[in-house]
Amino acid sequence: MFAQHIMGLSGLLAAALFILGLKRMSSPATALIGIVLAGIGMVVAVAASFLTIFDLPETARPYLTTNLTLAAVALVIGGGWAWLRGRKVEMTAMPQMVALYNGMGGGAAAAVAAVELSARGAPGALILAVTVAGALIGSISLTGSIIAWAKLDGKIDKPWRFGGQRIVNGLVFAATVVLGIAVIVFFDGPLLPVLAVLFFLGALAFGIMMTLPIGGADMPVVISLYNAFTGLAVGLEGYALQNPALMIAGMVVGSAGTLLTVLMAKAMNRSLANVLFSNFGDAAAGGAGEVQGQMKAADASDAGIAMRYASSVIIIPGYGLAVAQAQQKLYEFVKLLQAAGVDVKFAIHPVAGRMPGHMNVLLAEAGVPYDIIYDMEDINADFANTDVALVIGANDVVNPAARTDKTSPIYGMPILNADQAHQVYVIKRGQGKGYSGVENLLFYEENCNMVYGDAQAVLTRMVQAVKDLGA
């Protein structure tokens, strides 16, 4: 009984740490301590679960001892692997890692549900329904996140679509729901094993089928969506197990993920229904009208010198900056401009990069101060009075077609107003289109010049050009 009280108190402590950690994560300045607090909460919750053995009768302890030993081994293996991979992962691979770990959370919730369903007994209709719902959502999150990981990692390089795909997906989902209901109805019957296996196979298959049609440009929304799914699955299984730490952690993650999904969908001019039920990434299917003008190349040194003598510069980072691993060199360039009296700011679009907050993490890694990093809604009005906008690797998030071309698939999407700056420089490796496959009208504007090359090499030349001015 004593152990139960300790476990209950530990669960409340863990839940408080989860909530406090999430609150601290709302600001880049306190995000690190927030992650640490949430991690401590998880350690407390996991450690408390091992106290179960002290409240069991002697006859049951050998079985639980075996299970706890297996759990300890799993913790060592999983924790060790995650520690090593987390320390070595490149910034460009961060979205893939997040997608994969998110899927593991959903898979863990589904595995807990599978154990509960195999235990038989008499859990009650409500608990049984909650367990099945968690199993469904967790399984979808597992396989969906794995497909998202494969897309982000380049192992699946394009959407997989066929005629009538939505109907087929709908039928698979409906059949899976029916099987879930059958598991509840026939829980004590001989058909339970077969029904449960078919139910899990259907849920896992639907996660794959739901994600395969999605285009790479929409992966930030997908990652956020599956994050919400995982949180919801964990919360449901926490209720089934009567575990307050799991319930609160799952609800916090689920609600935060859902809110982020809505915000990301809004940033891409999509309704939540469109995010959930349509083929993502259809932008490449359409296109803007005939492009007027031509791209004009500029030398990196000339662009660097122009920014050195500007009064104000706004920098828009994108995935190309992460690919080139040029964030440190970019901040070196920024410090040179600031030393010369230039007002430098960073503008972040909600869907820049390959996952929510990707660019914020990238800049934080380089040590860029938080007070010069602005969200889109806070800085968009400043572009009209800015001397130079520097775009590095970003594409669709600065495409004026979203404002002007009603035939464009991205029409209506909120963008950063880079084109309104007096001069725009775009660092880009070539003349290819963005991730969505839409031609960027900004590149053809009179006030825009292209600086071709890898961002690391281009920024190195810019830095040297500015340094040479003071030599």
Image (cartoon, rainbow, N blue to C red):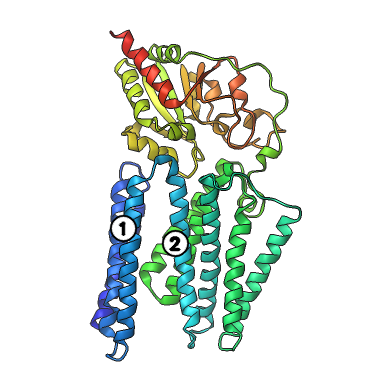
The N terminus appears in which quarter of the rendering? Answer: bottom left
Residue 224, position in %: x, y?
50, 51
Residue at image mark 1? 80
Decide if residue 196 is on the left or right side of residue 336. Answer: right
Residue 462, position in %: x, y?
39, 17
Numbered mark located on residue 428 in the image = none
- In terms of image quadrants, where is residue 406? top right
User: Could you tell me if residue 378 is visible in this image?
Assistant: yes
The C terminus appears in which quarter of the rendering? Answer: top left
Q: Nearer the viewer, mark 1 or mark 2?
A: 1
Closer to the N terminus: mark 1 or mark 2? 1
Residue at image mark 2? 105
- In terms of image quadrants, where is residue 400? top right
Residue 328, position in %: x, y?
34, 30
In the rendered picture of this protein, how many numbered marks are placed on residues?
2
User: Could you tell me if residue 231 is visible in this image?
Assistant: no
- In terms of image quadrants, where is residue 41? bottom left
Would you call the spot at circle 2 few (<14 residues within 10 Å), some (14-19), or many (20 or more)? many
Q: Amino acid at mark 1?
A: Gly
| Residue at left offset 57%, top offset 35% | 414
| Residue at left offset 32%, top offset 10% | 468
Q: Amino acid at mark 2?
A: Gly
Q: Is residue 390 above or below residue 93?
A: above
Q: Nearer the viewer, residue 121 or 273?
A: 121
| Residue at left offset 43%, top offset 58% | 253
For label 1, the SS is helix
Q: Is residue 451 above or below residue 51?
A: above
Would you call the spot at circle 1 few (<14 residues within 10 Å), some (14-19), or many (20 or more)? few
Residue 455, position in %: x, y?
44, 26
Q: Is residue 12 above or below residue 452?
A: below
Q: CA distance from mark 1 to mark 2?
A: 17 Å
